Amino acid sequence: MKKKGGNVTLSEVKEILDATVFVGEEKLDMEVKTAFSADLMSDVLAFAKEHSLLLTGLTNPQVVRTSDMLDIAAIILVRGKTPPEETIRLAKELNIPLLSTRYILFETSGRLHARGIVGCIEKVPLGEMT
Amino acid sequence: MTQDKKITKTQELIYSLRVKDVMSTDIVTVSPSNTMNELKEILRIRRISGTPVVEGKQLVGIVGIDDLIRCLSNGEMDATVGEKMSKKVETLCADEPLANAVNKFEQYGFGRFPVIERNHGRLIGILTKGDVVKGLLTRLEIAYHTEEFRYNNSINPVFDNIAMDKTNFHFQYRVDSRDFNVAGESINKLKKILSQIGFPPQIIRRVTIAAYEAEMNMIIYSYGGHISVSADQQHIILEACDAGPGIPDIEQAMRQGFSTAPVWVQELGFGAGMGLPNINKCADTMELKSEAGKGTHIKAVFNTTNGDGV
């Protein structure tokens, strides 16, 4: 069912994506409105906005570091990735929820969008295309 | 730091550093068609004792002061370099560990080795014993400072006993080349400090992103360096200085999507050619000075009087 402009809680996100929670069980009532999907941390740094979900297939600790810099609300690992121990440890230390879903990036994004979560930006600004 | 530890660090360095990390890229070369007379002038003016001989971009020989002396005494100064050079040249590959180079210096007793790129055999640099010593000393100094910083940190949590406000603080840390493990740790501290001081979240975000991009660049491309952040009445100033090797073409480096990052960096999700443009985007003004063979200095200024931004 489509929600219009409403916030979605992390716990709903978990349900929509049939996700496993590695870190942040206690923060599942957090509400999110926007998301950014990328496997390129360089692009995340350039375009992602604060309080968004980060959907990515990368699992190294720098994903958590980058999320911390950007005040990302939660990290959703796609394609069934299991994060390495150091990534989980860092996410705990920096208090960033870390979830994993078996859906592919396209499906993950689509399912969340259908439930009212939108891109943190729609397009990159003109003149910033690579 | 104990003596033993220093030795270990040096040993570690000669295995982890590559020839290309410490070689000189400012190379004097001659062509096989130059005469020995011309060679004499080049050696005299550049104050060197030998040069690689290059045709096109390929290394074809090496010629030195001993060849020159032989020609002088035989009255053959009009002969070409091509006739008198040694054609059998001992070279080093750019990606060889420094340890191999050290062994080769010992084995052959030569003062210098031309450095070639393994794939296409072109000459890209020259390595002297002086380069090796200089390279090692630079790294050891960086390693020493890092250790010192960590040591100081572990007894005194940063700045706990220093009064800080928006116009009076200074945060500085060392960045080690290739050390991804601690990347972002210091910036996490910086972020907390800026927020304790009370800067607006949007400014903090821009400063931390820029600092992180600068740190990543330093880890990936440089020999290491330091990052400092300070503030005055109207600005936060971020400075990133590294010890080289410098950016040969700044305009190209500033272009989005241009990258020379190796595969292992790209596998971590970095090195997409967004770093410098992103620092520029985050900052209100950015200056980039770089000289090939020397180092890079980035100064990014963030206005703190108007809180808007990215």
Image (cartoon, coloured by chain):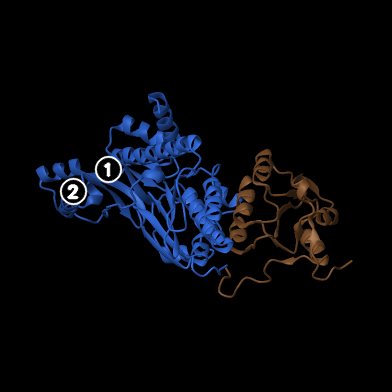
Residue A95, image x, y percentages? 68, 47
Q: Is residue A73 shown left or right of residue B173?
A: right
Q: Is residue B73 shown left or right of residue B310?
A: left
Residue B264 visible, this angle: yes
Residue B185, image x, y percentages? 55, 45
Camera-side residue: B35 or B243?
A: B243
The N terminus of chain B appears in which quarter of the rendering?
Answer: top left
Q: Is residue A25 shown left or right of residue A121?
A: right
Give the chain letter at badge 2. B
- Mark 2, residue position: B47
Q: Colour of chain B?
A: blue
Q: Chain A is drawn in which colour?
A: brown
Camera-side residue: B277 or B68?
A: B277
Q: Are marks 2 and 1 in contact (CB under 8 Å)?
A: no
Q: Specify the farthest residue to the right.
A: A1
Q: Is residue B145 shown left or right of residue A81?
A: left
The C terminus of chain B appears in which quarter of the rendering?
Answer: bottom right
Q: Residue at x 79, y 65 (%)?
A: A113
Q: Residue at x 69, y 71 (%)?
A: A122
For residue B86, the mark is 1
Give the chain letter at badge 1. B
Q: How many marks?
A: 2
Q: Say which amino acid is labelled 1.
A: Ser
Q: How far apart are marks 2 and 1 (CA)?
A: 20 Å
Q: Residue at x 42, y 63 (%)?
A: B233
Mark before the other along the chain sequence, 2 or 1: 2
